[in-house]
Amino acid sequence: MKPRDRLRIAMQKSGRLTEPALDLLNRCGLTFRQSRDKLFCFGEGEPVDLLLVRDDDIPGLIAQGVCDLGIVGRNVLSEFRGTAGESNGNAALTEWRKLGFGRCRLSIAVPQEMDYNAPQDLHGRRIATSYPGLLGEWLRTQGVDATVITLAGSVEIAPKLGTADAICDLVQSGGTLVANQLRETDVLLQSEAVLAGPEALPSDERGDMIELLLKRLDGVIQVRESRLLLLQTSRTSLDAVTRLLPGGPQPTLLPVAGQPDQLMLQALCAGEVSWRQLEEIKKAGAREMFVLPVEKMLA
Ligand SMILES: Nc1ncnc2c1ncn2[C@@H]1O[C@H](COP(=O)(O)OP(=O)(O)OP(=O)(O)O)[C@@H](O)[C@H]1O
Ligand SMILES: O=P(O)(O)OC[C@H]1O[C@H](OP(=O)(O)OP(=O)(O)O)[C@H](O)[C@@H]1O
Ligand SMILES: [Mg+2]
């Protein structure tokens, strides 16, 4: 293969991961010249280009060295790793970063009326899936002997059509399962989009660019997941309120003008603050609560 001096990242051409992946790269300061419906996008500022492909092709493109990195679901990457042995030689791919979008899980689901208590109930059954590698591995670890039926899509319909007794497919809200009178029984894999690449970084300029990109990604992900929590509390409730704060550095306390028994508390939280957490904190004595997104951060 011809040596390249520009970094090449594979991402999904059109699908669930396309917008969030491009948004993330933009936030890392990468912009691209060609329109998104083209196969190749040339990086404008930095020497980083994009290849837009079917998500299933991404691990193979990295393993073959056609691309240096890829943004792909862990489900697709893990399936490739499991089946890569025979067809792709030494395809040692790794997850460089978890990207926090495209969250879903790979699960077994059975018809609602089926008597199912444990994986052993799948003995001798037919299971339809688009993930034969991951399913086969799970069945082996469970010591279950079942027939794996590989389908490219519309897996959930297989039990109704009588072509399978159970399925193994992606679940997010569970809506598709309910619509097909199926119930989820076992989770094989928790998935989200990841930045995938070879285990060893290239030893040329591309390796330096990857290191720079990883640093920027870390900053972008940290800011994206950070929230600033502001609230008011009495000094007597302070301990109870502080105990309930989501993880992060020590909060800052500020006096409230004209109310010596009151404090304004400011806390940087490392993740989303849920309504439930807010309600608990309020019960402990807080009021005037605000949760703000963080735009930029420089420690
Ligand atoms: N319901 C869902 N909610 C969230 N993420 C999902 C969901 N379904 C799939 N994903 C994740 O998004 C990835 C891409 O899903 P999508 O449906 O766009 O793929 P696809 O139909 O295989 O697309 P392609 O045309 O690129 O092959 C999946 O591999 C998975 O990681
Ligand atoms: O649990 P849910 O929120 O219902 O999501 C799960 C569904 O989403 C994905 O399909 P998608 O919507 O991409 O349709 P497709 O696979 O037929 O393209 C996946 O293959 C499941 O069918
Ligand atoms: Mg696909």
Image (cartoon, helix red, strand yellow):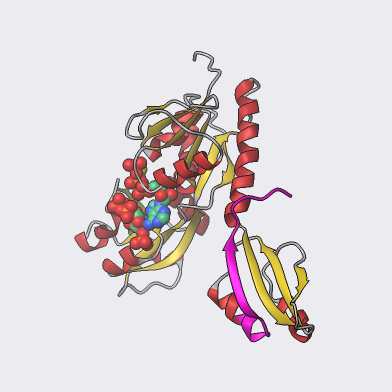
Above or below residue 138? Residue 70 is above
Q: At x 27% / y 53%, what residue is drawn?
A: 154
Q: At x 41% / y 45%, what residue is drawn?
A: 19
Residue 286 lies, in percent from the top left, at 66, 81
The one nearer the camera, 183 or 49, is: 49
Give the image quarter of residue 119: bottom left
Highlighted magenta segment, given as a residue range = 280-299
Query: Residue extending furthest left?
Result: 161
Q: At x 62% / y 24%, what residue is drawn?
A: 202
Say left or right for 234 vs 175: right
The one nearer the camera, 2 or 188, is: 2
Residue 138 lies, in percent from the top left, at 48, 54
Q: At x 71% / y 62%, what residue is drawn?
A: 248
Residue 89 lies, in percent from the top left, at 51, 28
Say left or right for 44 vs 283: left
Q: Is residue 168 magenta?
A: no
Q: Is residue 290 magenta?
A: yes
Note whether residue 272 is visible.
no
Note whether residue 47 is visible.
yes
The one nearer the camera, 212 or 236, is: 236
Above or below residue 206? Residue 114 is below
The one nearer the camera, 5 or 287, is: 287
